[in-house]
Image (tube, rainbow, N blue to C red):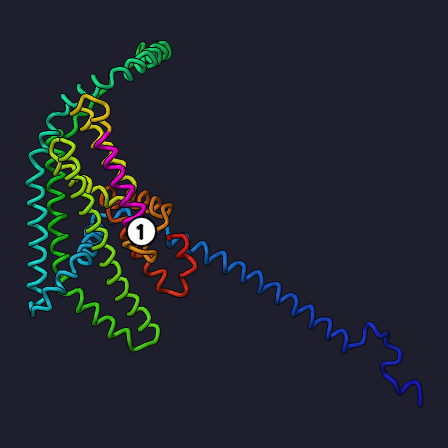
Amino acid sequence: MNESSDPDRHIPAEVKPAEVKKDDTLSLKSGIAQINARLLKSSHLERHILMGLLLLGIFYTIYFARGLLLPIVIALLLAALLQPAVSFLARFKIPNTIAAILVILLMVSVVLLVAYRIAAPASEWFDRRPYLVNQLEYKLRSFKNSLEEAKETTKKIEKLTNLADEEGEPGEVVVKGPSLSDQIMDRMKATAVMVGIILVLTYFLLSRGRPTLKHMADEMNETGQGKKWARIMVKVQREVALYLVTISVINLSLGVLTAAAMALLKMPNPILWGVVAMTFNFVPYLGAIMTTLIIGTVSLVTFNEWPQILLPPLVFLCFTALEGQFVTPTIVGNRLQLNPIAVIVSLLFWGWIWGIGGMVIAVPILAAIKIVITSTDELKAFGAMIG
């Protein structure tokens, strides 16, 4: 064969056109893969940033819309609490509209009756504040004397430190604000308006909430995903109602036991302290601490002997310990047991967002969130953080 008949004979192997083309293709694919990886990382980062901004926007809205959202949330929880009573009346062929009115009227009557019974002793204790302060100072004088010396030393140091600053200081202008009575009246008006809104919303939720929920479930049942969320909605409503009823019965029992114990221990106004124990126990941990301090203070100003003084708060501590460690876990069960850390965080968060009302509804909201998480396969991994 003639040497000139082979066209690739004089081309080196490393620069053959087929191999060059193959290397260029591999380099191009590698570059595209690197670009895709960078774009994927960038999209993940943007997604996390957008998620963070969304959460901040939600927190901002919840905080500044508390005047609108707080009555709605309380009405939803009240409707869940009272729904079993409406369902019970419906067995006797009573329409939901009438049953809702009857249940709300019964609830308001009970609240007003209890408020009437405790209003006089509560106002009496409020009016006796100067006397109570004097009694506390007298009975705690041994502790006070030891603190007075440290306080006097601190004042002397402060005088020496601020002496130069006080010379030549201009007089302060004090702007007089609204009086205490005006502030109390404004607060009472705002509270009355909020209570009225809550009662109206609760009525409509009780009378029309169940049919609306059923209609939504029927509409969502057309798709597989809709069936799933319809089941979750019904389950959340049922289990939140069961949780609220159970906790309310437990707190009522604690209040009755506390009132009976305080009466046996000769404490003044035992019904008042029973109501305080029942109400404050809706705020876990902090409520028990506050009730113990109140009962301890009343016992201190009432009795003279230390064994008699210490007995009422110790008895209540025993009651609340039994309730928190044995009764509630046994009755509520593991399904709705909540992580104490999650409870404290929820109390702090909702207390910061919505004040005292937020602290009262913090645990029911956390329980509802747990029910949703445990009912959704995609979110079950987060359930361990709540309980």
Toward the bottom, the furthest residue is 1
Residue 365 % position (x, y):
28, 53
Is 198 above or below relative to 300?
below
Verify whether residue 304 appears in magenta.
no
Residue 190 appears in which quarter of the rendering? Answer: top left
Q: Which residue position holds label 1?
A: 329
User: Which percent across, then down, holds residue 204?
Assistant: 13, 61
Of the pair 87 and 361, the residue shown nearer to us: 87
**Is 368 displayed left or right of 183 in the figure?**
right
**Picture residue at 69% right of the left edge, 68% below the top:** 27
125 vs 277: above or below: above
Give me the residue at 21% from left, 68% from top. Answer: 213
Instruction: Tell me if residue 343 comes above or below residue 38 in the rendering.
Output: above
Return the x and y of residue 201 as percentages of the image width and height: 14, 57
- Label 1 residue SS: helix
- Measured as percent of width and height from the top left, residue 374 is found at 36, 61
- Left or right for 349, reference 51: left
Q: Residue type at mark 1? A: Pro
Q: Nearer the viewer, residue 258 or 294?
A: 258
Nearest to the observer: residue 10 or residue 375:
375
Give the quadrant of the N terminus: bottom right
Q: How many marks?
A: 1
Question: In the picture shown, does residue 70 fall above or below 4?
Answer: above
Q: Residue furthest right?
A: 2
Disc 1: CA contacts within 10 A as few (<14), some (14-19) or many (>=20): some
User: Which image quarter: residue 149?
Assistant: top left
Which secondary structure dominates the residues rendered in magenta? helix
Question: What residue range appears in magenta?
Answer: 311-327
